[in-house]
Image (tube, rainbow, N blue to C red):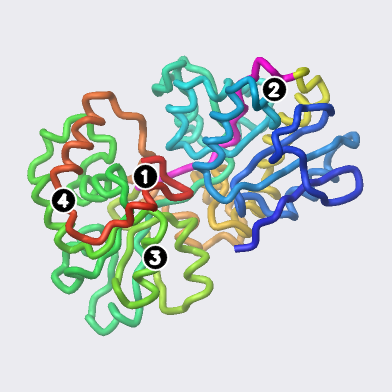
Amino acid sequence: MKRRSLLIGSSSVALAALVGGCRRRDNGLRVLFLEDSVPPQVLKAFRSALSQPLPLSFVPRPQLASIVEQLETWQTAESPQTADLVTLGDAWLTEAIQQKLIQPLEVSSIPGWERVPKPWQDLVTRDRQGALSAAGLVWGAPYRWGSVAIAFRRDKLDPLGWQLRDWADLWRPELAGMLSLPDSPRTVLGLVLKKLGRSVNEANLAAVPNLQDELAALDDQTKFYSSTDYLQPLLIDDTWAAVGWTTDILPVMQGDPRIGAVIPASGTMLFSDLWVRPARSPSTESDPGAIAESALAQWIDFCWQPETATRLSLQTAAASPIFALNASDLPADLRNRELRLPAESILQKSEFLLPLSPASAAQFRQAWSALPRQAWADPSAQQSRRSAA
């Protein structure tokens, strides 16, 4: 994948001082974002839409985990904050709030907030411990989202005479030893819970009948665990089906007609990319200023405008949240793209992975550690660009 920095200045595209950690010396807007999550056309359109010229710096990072590391680095006196906004995956939101890596957003100054569907608003409304709270503060601005899906080899499954449609199909004997799964307890346990008709955020796993047996049976089906390389075995005939994130699966499907994918009919796990505001570093020389504050709100609102949302949904491997629950407003080009926008019947049964209580988190860890997990697991790839756990 080509790595590049997109920096929109007054007249050119150039390399930013943002990555180098230089101190802030301008009144412009600086954004550190997940690579491929914002098309270049959107950045150019935003510059044109500004009411007055402003230095704009947009710098990509290939992994969400590296952005989290940058937020942590900005907490030290030796490395002052150099960005006004960064991309954060919702899986990291609780940790970022608890560690005071980010600060709340003033959504009252962002006119597009009402366009965001309530489930996405609820996802980012938290108390200062990172727990969901209707009376809490808004800690992020969702700008795109995706799902956990099942990718499969058409040429391997078509001759079997059945179609892979739901989580339960992963337990079929024809797929014994032919699965690759993320090395992620929340994701794997989540799909087992969905198969059993339960919530992926189940508070008490001990109350779920047959959970450990079902999890062990799925482990027996699995040949490979990795949160970064789970699609590679599918491409080289080592596995026939793989569970993963649509942002990974869609680009592979576009390049390989052998690969199909499905959002399970019983519902799935959702994720969202957010714009979050780094906490103010004590060593920052100056506040961004009123102009940059206005540009920050304008950028977030710009991402929620229908034309921009359409570009985000068509030109990246994810969808804008403003279309999630508004099928009547769906642009024609986005219809029948169910990997980006699942059917409403599936979406209503799908869930975000929400913060767990310490007791519930311990149960998830215990259930995961009890597995033999004799399948090949990649110890060097425990985090993907999507998942924090």
Label placed on residue 109: 2
Front position in the image: 126 or 85: 85
Residue matched to label 4: 215
Find numbered disc 3 in the image and state the secondary structure of the residue it sits on.
loop
Q: Is residue 8 above or below residue 240?
A: above
Q: What amino acid is found at the position of numbered circle 4 in the picture?
A: Leu
Q: Nearer the viewer, mark 4 or mark 1?
A: 4
Find numbered disc 1 in the image and state the secondary structure of the residue it sits on.
loop
Q: Left of 295 or right of it: where is 319?
A: left
Residue drawn at the location 77% of the way across and 43% of the way down: 16
- Rate crowding at label 3 as few (under 14), some (14 to 19) or many (20 or more) other CA atoms within 10 Å: many
> Which percent across, then down, holds residue 174?
17, 74
Of pointers 2 and 3, the one earlier in the residue sequence: 2
Find numbered disc 2 in the image and state the secondary structure of the residue it sits on.
helix
Q: Nearer the viewer, mark 3 or mark 1?
A: 3
> Which percent across, then down, holds residue 278?
61, 26
Q: Is residue 232 above or below residue 81?
A: below
- Rate crowding at label 1 as few (under 14), some (14 to 19) or many (20 or more) other CA atoms within 10 Å: few
What segment is highlighted magenta in the picture?
269-284
Label placed on residue 228: none
Q: Are marks 3 and 1 in contact (CB under 8 Å)?
A: no
Q: What amino acid is found at the position of numbered circle 1 in the picture?
A: Gln
Of pointers 2 and 4, the one earlier in the residue sequence: 2
Q: Could you give the CA–CA distance between mark 2 and mark 4, rounded to whole angstroms? A: 47 Å
Q: Main secondary structure of the magenta part?
A: strand
Q: Nearer the viewer, mark 2 or mark 1?
A: 2
Q: Could you give the CA–CA distance between mark 3 and mark 4, rounded to whole angstroms? A: 21 Å
Q: Nearer the viewer, mark 2 or mark 3?
A: 3
